[in-house]
Amino acid sequence: MKKTVKTSRVAGQLEKMYRLLNARFFNGELPEVVISLKKTVGAYGHFTCNKVWQAGDERRYEINISSATLSRPIEETCATLLHEMCHCLAAEKGIKDTSGSGNFYHNRKYKEIAESHGLCVEKHPKYGWTITSPGLPLLDFIEEQGWQDLQMCEAVSLWDVIGTLPKGAGNGTAPKTKKPSSTRKYICPCCHQSVRATKAVNILCGDCMEKMEPTE
């Protein structure tokens, strides 16, 4: 019997995240996939346009997350996973979301899919609408799930698995240091409505017309 290694535990956690993201952003429409962790040159991840894995009586797509990039903030890893899930949606619906002989150029159809599923999209001069970052819907979902406390790295297991350990605790030892979030939270001083942003912003509450204040 093949032993479960630390890398496979990380892949298993990514599979759990895939299912929760699927339910939240795709209404559970995406099929089960195989999550792999391999180093990819010049990319954070990739999606196989064909179902290359056999799982029992069915075939599955593969989503790879480059193992060399796992140390990035969890928000960025989630954005990469969601990026590839948008390709999965396009494949399932028969939408041609990439162009060119190598299928590397992300066209406007991909941009529309990504922006409607929790991502912000910028254009790369060579590869099109491929630069994705977490949008506010994704950032809010990450906060709801408590994922901002997760830390992944190559060949090392997660120290805080969703639903199994209290935040900041690790196998009965001293509490781990919380990984700082890459986002900022702003609160209206009047109605206490809150928003999150990926950088410092000057923002007004639309209801109270008061400047929202940053909070830790």
Image (cartoon, rainbow, N blue to C red):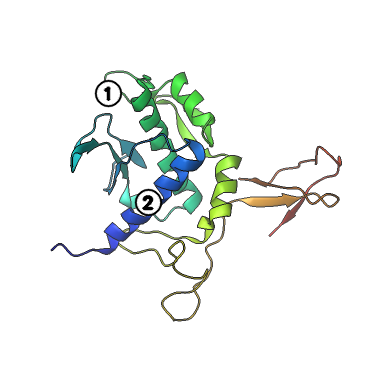
Residue 89: horizontal and vertical position, in percent?
39, 30
**Residue pushed farthest left?**
1
Neighbourhood count class around disc 1 (C-alpha, 10 Å): few under 14, some 14–19, many 20 upward: few
Secondary element at tag 1: loop
Residue at the (32%, 37%) spot, across then down: 46
Residue type pointed to by label 1: Gly
Closer to the chain start, of discs 1 and 2, is: 2
Residues at discs 1 and 2 in contact (Cβ within 8 Å): no
Where residue 154 appears, x then y in whole percent?
Answer: 32, 58
CA separation, marks 1 and 2?
27 Å
Residue type of the residue flagged with mark 2:
Leu
Q: Quadrant of residue 45?
A: top left
In the rendered image, the vertical position of residue 167 relative to residue 91, given as above or below:
below
Residue 147 sits above or below residue 201 on the image: below
10 relative to 26 in the view: left or right:
left
Image location of residue 195, percent across then percent down: 69, 46
Please name the residue shown 60% across and 51% down the image: 183
Q: Which mark is residue 102?
A: 1
Of residue 124 and residue 9, the one placed in the foreground of this image is 9
Which residue extends farthest bottom? 173
Q: Is residue 43 in view?
A: no
Task: Kindly give the residue lying farthest to the front in the view shown.
Answer: 57
Residue labelled with disc 2: 14
The foreground one among 164 and 135 is 164
